[in-house]
């Protein structure tokens, strides 16, 4: 039996009268890429915010790396978050910093007693892993959307997280850059052995990177399995999703 690194049990979340998650159950296994599919507004991003304690559910449980997330205090949450990398949809880079400084920031903040040479080595290694070592002295405004996305992933990976959370990693990117980001997600899995949840409504991304796919409808996972298994159905909602034009913004 594969080892679970994330366990979600009977998760319920509502904002006023808007019931976003209605009894969600999910396991992420060690070394797995799990894609969560769903149209905009279905609760995908809410789900991953629960995993790092950014939001709290109305009921249910969330266990990450054997830790009950809801029972952790702020210091314990910070320690857990160091093991969980969060790749934001907008890359979340500091515009006033160079690429080097953006990558140094989490290292200097979270890893004590690093020498200058150790910091330089880890920054260069992280950039090399995403194919952007040459951008080290540039600022984010000088980079393309795809390059900023790669730098954001490199900054997340520099702390060597055990789990990666990707929020709409291909949103707003052209098809060629989407292909590059999808390849990078697979490379991260192979090279680092990371377990990942990829939140998306991009079917090409889902098919390319997902070991398993979970489809979220009406606050619950209605379909789960390989990409082909999930879409091998006459369910009208699934078929509509398959033919949906994935240009709607979050």
Image (cartoon, rainbow, N blue to C red):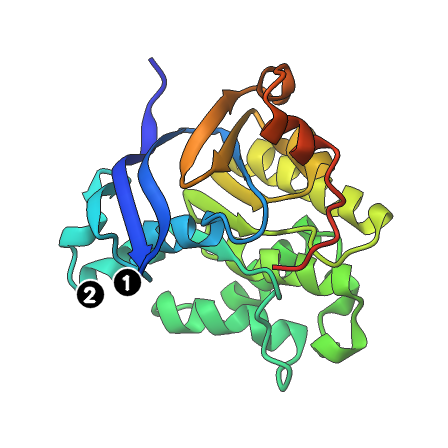
Residue 243 is left or right of residue 216, and the answer is: right
Q: Position of residue 114 (x, y in %)?
A: 42, 68
Which of these two is toward me, 171 or 18? Answer: 18
Q: Secondary structure at mark 1?
A: helix
Residue 216 is left or right of residue 141, and the answer is: left
Which of these two is toward me, 41 or 123? Answer: 41
Residue at the spot 41% in from the left edge and 50% down from the top edge? 48
Mark 2 = which residue?
A: 75
Which of these two is toward me, 125 or 218? Answer: 218
Q: Position of residue 11 (x, y in %)?
A: 27, 41
Quadrant in the picture for the C terminus = bottom right
Mark 1 = which residue?
A: 78
Residue at the spot 70% in from the left edge and 31% down from the top edge? 242
How many C-alpha atoms fall within 10 Å of the one at disc 1: few (<14), some, or many (≥20)?
some
Residue at the spot 34% in from the left edge and 68% down from the top edge? 112
Q: Position of residue 30 (x, y in %)?
A: 41, 29
Residue 115 appearing in the image: no
Which of these two is toward me, 5 or 235? Answer: 235
Residue at the spot 78% in from the left edge and 71% down from the top edge? 143
Residue 53 is left or right of residue 202, and the answer is: left
Report the number of discs. Answer: 2
Residue 109 appearing in the image: yes
The answer to whether residue 159 is above or below residue 26 is below
Residue sitting farthest toward the bottom? 96
Q: Which mark is residue 249?
A: none
Q: Position of residue 227 (x, y in %)?
A: 62, 22
**Pointer 1 and pointer 2: residues touching (CB < 8 Å)?**
yes
Quadrant in the picture for the N terminus = top left
Mark 1–mark 2 distance (CA, rounded to whole Å): 5 Å
How many C-alpha atoms fall within 10 Å of the one at disc 2: few (<14), some, or many (≥20)?
few
């Amino acid at each position: 039996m594969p080892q679970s690194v994330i366990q979600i049990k009977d998760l319920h979340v509502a904002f006023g009268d808007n019931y976003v998650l209605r009894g969600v159950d999910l396991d992420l296994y060690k070394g797995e890429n799990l894609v969560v599919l769903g149209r905009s507004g279905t609760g995908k991003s809410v789900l991953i915010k629960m995993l790092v304690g950014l939001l709290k559910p109305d009921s249910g449980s969330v266990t990450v790396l054997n830790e009950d997330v809801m029972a952790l205090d702020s210091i314990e949450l910070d320690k857990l978050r160091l093991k969980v990398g969060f790749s934001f949809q907008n890359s979340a880079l500091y515009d006033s910093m160079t690429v080097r400084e953006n990558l140094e920031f989490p290292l200097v903040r979270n890893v004590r007693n690093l020498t200058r040479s150790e910091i330089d080595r880890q920054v260069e290694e992280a950039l090399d892993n995403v194919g952007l070592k040459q951008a080290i002295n540039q600022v984010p405004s000088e980079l393309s959307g795809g390059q900023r996305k790669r730098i954001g992933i490199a900054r997340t990976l520099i702390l060597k997280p055990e789990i990666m959370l990707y929020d709409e990693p291909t949103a707003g990117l052209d098809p060629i850059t989407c292909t590059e980001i999808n390849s990078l997600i697979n490379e991260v899995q192979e090279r680092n052995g990371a377990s990942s949840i990829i939140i998306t409504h991009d079917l090409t991304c889902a098919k390319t990177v997902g070991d398993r796919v979970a489809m979220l409808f009406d606050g619950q996972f209605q379909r789960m399995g390989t990409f082909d298994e999930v879409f091998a159905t006459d369910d009208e909602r699934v078929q509509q999703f398959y033919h949906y034009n994935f240009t709607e913004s979050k």
